Amino acid sequence: MPIANQLAPAWQEAAIASVISLAKAPDGDFGVINKLADVMAEPNSLQAMFDYLSSLPEGKLAFLERPRVGTVDLPTLAQLPADSFGYAYAQHMLANHLNPISAGPVETDLQYLGAHITETHDIWHVITGCNTNILGEIQLEAFYVAQLQSTRFWLALLTKNLLKAVVYDIEASSQYMKAICQGWQLGKQAKPLFGMPWQQLWSEPLQTIRANLNL
Amino acid sequence: MPIANQLAPAWQEAAIASVISLAKAPDGDFGVINKLADVMAEPNSLQAMFDYLSSLPEGKLAFLERPRVGTVDLPTLAQLPADSFGYAYAQHMLANHLNPISAGPVETDLQYLGAHITETHDIWHVITGCNTNILGEIQLEAFYVAQLQSTRFWLALLTKNLLKAVVYDIEASSQYMKAICQGWQLGKQAKPLFGMPWQQLWSEPLQTIRANLNL
């Protein structure tokens, strides 16, 4: 189902303003990122993302079973074998001083879509091997666009990063473009990550999971 | 020589405003495009582009000899053999109702840089095979970023197109990303197009020129 060609002018203005605010903000300003997320989560594009994902066998199953990451105990995961996904995830979270995000209960498919994407972001970093520096974030943003399609939020983040390069750091443009293309190709080549039952996979070897996902 | 980390805040505001104006304008509004070009042609990044291009043998020669496209007579070029570059260029210009751009006399390297890029834009379309529709323009914008580095103007156009997708046409995002990556890879794989003596090549077979440029 195609999205209505034009959303309301007020939404368009708010969308542009939220990208500009983020471009002007220091990296990692979560207040501004949350504002962007709120604006970009308009129901038409969420529905288009749902339609696309649920057209894939993996996505269809995900919306049926709605697997959640659940409670994550990093010290316990850090005791798993060194080649396991859970160990790699724990190391990633501890090294970057991150806490697992719990996205709360969901009742609808669109709520599940948002909650699952939110709570698996750090997992996607680990599984794809995308770093948490700006180049890794750009790679992962392009990966999301390749995997989710119609994702205003991740495309907006990518756009914001290119705008920052134009205005503040043009000499970064080659690295940014390279990161975009690497992330895009990885996202196209990989099987869908959306809806994977990650909480069942902590003990599995990371390399096995990656290989199964064509990563 | 790295660009001064930050340009003046007034320039930064003007740069962001020019991207936003272009995103809000209808496609092909040359008044707004010219405004963007004026803002983006700040001397620090032009100097960085010059430094990069003149570090390449082809670019060094280009700045030494400053080849210009000169006067172009489309009806005459249209009489050349059907496999020639000149014939393909004439057909491209006539089919798209375009007139050759004459960028005027130049006295400095940075003036040559700007004039040559301006007057060869349609030639780059023909040589790269990038269409004049939005996907072809996006491909070519990414090609420019790959070939010129530090080009605020072409990266700004790319950014504007991604912003338009975020706000007005999110379902175009996959096609746009594919076009970006195609153009980027083509630009990286090709030999430098900057400074080619195109006016000496009208009679050459287009395929020979492309092959010589790894296109």
Image (tube, coloured by chain):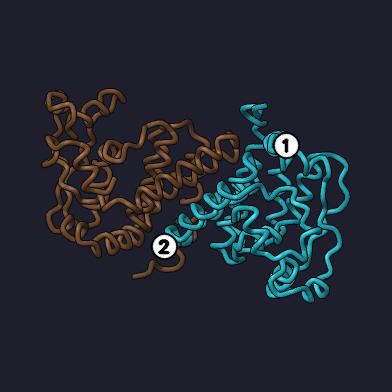
Chain colours: A brown, B cyan
Question: Which of label 2 and label 1 is nearer to you?
Answer: 1
Q: Which quarter shows the N terminus of chain B? A: top right
Chain under callout 2: B
Local secondary structure at mark 1: loop
Give the percent coordinates (x, y) of residue A83: 18, 30
Local secondary structure at mark 2: helix
As drawn, the label of residue B54 is 1
The front one of A151 and B10 is A151
Tell me the quarter of the picture where residue A100 sits: top left
Q: Are marks 2 and 1 on the same chain?
A: yes
Depicted B152 relative to depicted B205: above or below: above
Residue at left 45%, top 41%? Answer: A179
Residue A10 shows up from this direction: no
Chain under callout 1: B
Residue at left 86%, top 53%? Answer: B104
Q: CA distance from mark 2 to mark 1?
A: 40 Å
Depicted A151 relative to depicted B4: above or below: below
Tell me the quarter of the picture where residue B161 sits: bottom right
Mark 1 is on which residue type?
Answer: Ser
Give the percent coordinates (x, y) of residue A175: 51, 37
The front one of B168 and A95 is A95
Depicted A86 relative to depicted B16: above or below: above
Mark 2 is on which residue type?
Answer: Glu
As drawn, the label of residue B171 is 2
Q: Are marks 2 and 1 in contact (CB under 8 Å)?
A: no
